[in-house]
Amino acid sequence: MGLGGCIILIAVGAILTFATDWDMQGVNLDLVGIILMIVGLIGVTTFSSIARRRRVVVPPTTPVVDDGRRHTRDGYGDGYGV
């Protein structure tokens, strides 16, 4: 479930909890709305922690060796016989 699905769960839960006054026998819609909002919040925190972990840049494991010489090609000394 992506970030959009989590936000939809939060919105539907808030609508069920705060904006409706329906009565269903055997179902407490306020509790269902609160549960949906909690599941949506858990989804948002999980999604954001996974997305944050993906952005971590790992440094290379092999060392870079620089011998100090700079190789340039100027057209005259292109390496043949030099």
Image (cartoon, rainbow, N blue to C red):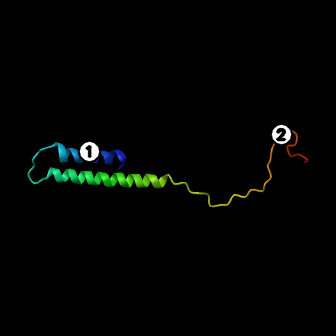
Q: Foreground: 56 or 73?
A: 56
List the residue tagged with mark 2.
74
Residue drawn where x is 15% and y is 50% of the image = 29
Q: Amino acid at mark 2?
A: Asp
Label 1 and label 2: CA atoms lie apart by: 65 Å
Residue drawn where x is 29% and y is 44% of the image = 8
Mark 2 neighbour class, 10 Å CA radius: few under 14, some 14 to 19, many 20 or more: few
The answer to which image quadrant residue 67 occupies is bottom right
Query: Residue 43: x, y in percent?
Result: 33, 53
Residue drawn where x is 11% and y is 45% of the image = 22
Direction front: furthest residue = 18
Query: Residue 2: x, y in percent?
Result: 37, 48
In the image, taking residue 48 as reference, residue 29 lies left or right, namely left
Label 1 element class: helix
In the image, taking residue 29 as reference, residue 56 lies left or right, namely right
Query: Residue 78: x, y in percent?
Result: 85, 43
List the residue tagged with mark 1.
11
- Whether tag 1 and tag 2 are in contact, CB under 8 A, the answer is no
Q: Amino acid at mark 1?
A: Ala
Query: Residue 44: x, y in percent?
Result: 35, 51
